Amino acid sequence: MRELIMKPRSWLLSCWTVVITGIAGAGEVQPLSPEDLWAERLIGQVTVSPGGKNAAYVLSTIDRARNAYVRRIYEVSTTGGGVPVPLTRGDSEDTEPAYSPDGKWLAFLSDRDGTSRVYLLRRQGGEPFMPFKLDSDASAISWSPDSTRISFLAQVPSPKPETDVRVIDRYRYRLDGAGYVGAHEEQLYEGNIANGQVQKLTEGMFSVADPRYSPDGSMVLFTANVTPDHDFNYNTDICTVPSGGGKVARLTMTAEGESRPQYSPDGRMIAYLRARRPNDYYASNDLWVMASSGSNQVDLSGRFDRNVGLEGYEESTLCAPRWSADGKHVYILLQTGPDTALYRCPSAKRSRPELVMQIAGQIEYPFPVDNGRRLVHGRQFPTASTELCISNLDGSQSTRLTFHQQERLKDRLISTPETFPIRSADGTPIDGWIVKPPQFDPFKKYPLILDIHGGPAWYYGNIFYPEMQMWAAQGWIVLYTNPHGSTGYGQAFIDSIKADWGNLDYKDMMAAVDAAVATGYVDERRIGVTGLSYGGIMTNWIVGHTDRFRAAVSEEGLSNFASSYGTDDCQIDWEHELGLPWENEALYRRLSPLTYAREVKTPILIIHGEDDFRTAIDQAEQWFVTLKRLGKDVLFLRYPRESHEWRGSGEPLHRYDRMKRILEWWKKYLDGTQDKSDR
């Protein structure tokens, strides 16, 4: 499909590989199963020490007995050949490692005392301690250049309420994952390491994020929504405030949202991301630079029609712009189809981004070291989750630094996804992939599962999807695609389904199934469809428009768009795309799967988290009750305390239960004896 700039070598797992110690017996190779969840090991929140000799990261594992996650900070030498060493221990969640600029300290967040607090660890040894007292959870820590202060975000302490009644006066009063936000949001604070004093730097601001000190330590850079109607827009601007406190200065005053600001090494310039359109969910980001005063704002990457950064990822170190040591270039990650590649832009002029490194997978956490000659970064491929490595800037002479996935997957069969190009109904080429069962026989016919990604402005990449591997191991072929509306193919491709869901995207998905059936090894009587979020919405839509699917699993989807307005946290998105529901009733009704409930013939499993504020559970409730009243084959699973993205981060026992129940559903309908005509 596209030229591979750097071929992954010894550490790219082969077509069949293995996983997870302690479940299978020695030398015994088995497929993935829900039991493998308990050996999950995921790398995140990578950072590099001053000088680039070491990298610290968070390794997330699961404690089954406590139904909890354990997140510890590890350190590994970037010279290669070393063994990662745990810097923190115990059963707490230790996150956001940050080296002090003088190299003497490692700051991090930990909930070891019940709430998330800032801790310090001496690099020379000793036990972690809290340098200052906080009254609420902290996040987004950043060091001052002289290593004497730490800026961070924290909720403003509020008096204990006299009643459990919630008094609501904000338009957007709850957010998925955060819950009820109330009248006050996180503010920017600064803590002094020497005397333990903490000072609040901002007051009454909203959506504060991404604090960074200026190279001389005099200012703290951050983003915030400072507009009077902050609940009605996504207009985050770049601001500064003096270290120690003072007047906040607003550097950008555009309607588009800015994010991820980073000072140049000399402090004279700021690189940042800006959305192409205001309040538009579909708008991609471009790389901009400006003077540190806010003047001379220049779009560096706008000539390249791809989104800057990784769409939807909140973790700033994963994909934030990064300056070269000499300040002449800004490194960025660009999504190109299913892959992410490292590019750089000259900081002094607008030009097409220059490709630095590309792999058939995802590049993460890029940190140029050794005066820009080498790159510490994460790599993820379709056969394994992220591992850290160091290579030349172009990707050559790569050395792997961590081996957590090799340990995790050493006893498991993993199928390498195969590219499966599709031609859309309008002639547009569509990227697709299939995952075949182990010991696949092209002369046999297999059940097929169509898996639809979320979004819709999202994508399936060349990364590891363990649940697809699990399904393939059961003897089912898995098909997944990037239909119209997906990111990575240009702004026009994303915009093509705007206010028109269920048209081009639906046709793409059906064309993909047609192409799979045409191979001759798919049993068209045993095809399933599934998806989460937008994928759940499209699953609901599909079963109301065709009876070709034997079974369906809809997760965190929507059924009634009009009633979703006001129960989710997407009011701005609804208004921008479809208008107000009482003004555009016909459009809301036409796009809602509930409108077509009478036509549903496919057995459907509905899964939803009860604390989902992105696609609220009332949508699943309406869908289930309507289908049940109509006599359809439907089952509803509700998971308490779970928000929208709990499939990958929810309570472990819930995640385990979900995987088992989905397998049972597929087995019942894709492997069962009940004939399609019996429905």
Image (spheres, rainbow, N blue to C red):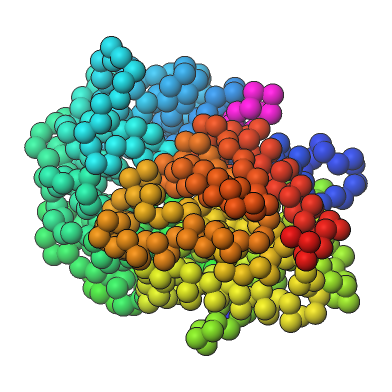
Quadrant of the image containing the C terminus: bottom right
Q: Nearer the viewer, residue 125 or 431?
A: 431
Where is residue 491 drawn, in percent x and y? 37, 73
Q: Residue placed at 55% from the left, 82% from the top?
A: 424
Whether 102 is drawn above or below 275: the answer is above
Q: Is residue 391 left or right of residue 136?
A: right
Q: Residue 408 magenta-drawn?
A: no
- Please tell me which residue lies in front, 83 or 542: 542
Q: Main secondary structure of the magenta part?
A: strand
Q: How many marks?
A: 0
Please give the range of residues in magenta. Answer: 60-70
Identify the residue at horizontal 70%, vertical 48% (top origin). 662
Q: Residue at x 48, y 54 (%)?
A: 559
What residue lies at 86% left-to-right and 41% top-to-bottom?
Answer: 24
- Furthest toward the top, the residue is 162
Give residue 430's position: percent from left, percent from top. 55, 78
The quadrant holding residue 276 is: bottom left
Apparent side of residue 71 relative to residue 255 in the rendered image (left or right) = right
Q: Name the quadrant containing residue 602.
A: bottom right
Is residue 200 visible in the rendered image? The answer is yes
Q: Position of residue 123 (x, y in %)?
A: 47, 29
Q: Quadrant of the N terminus?
A: bottom right
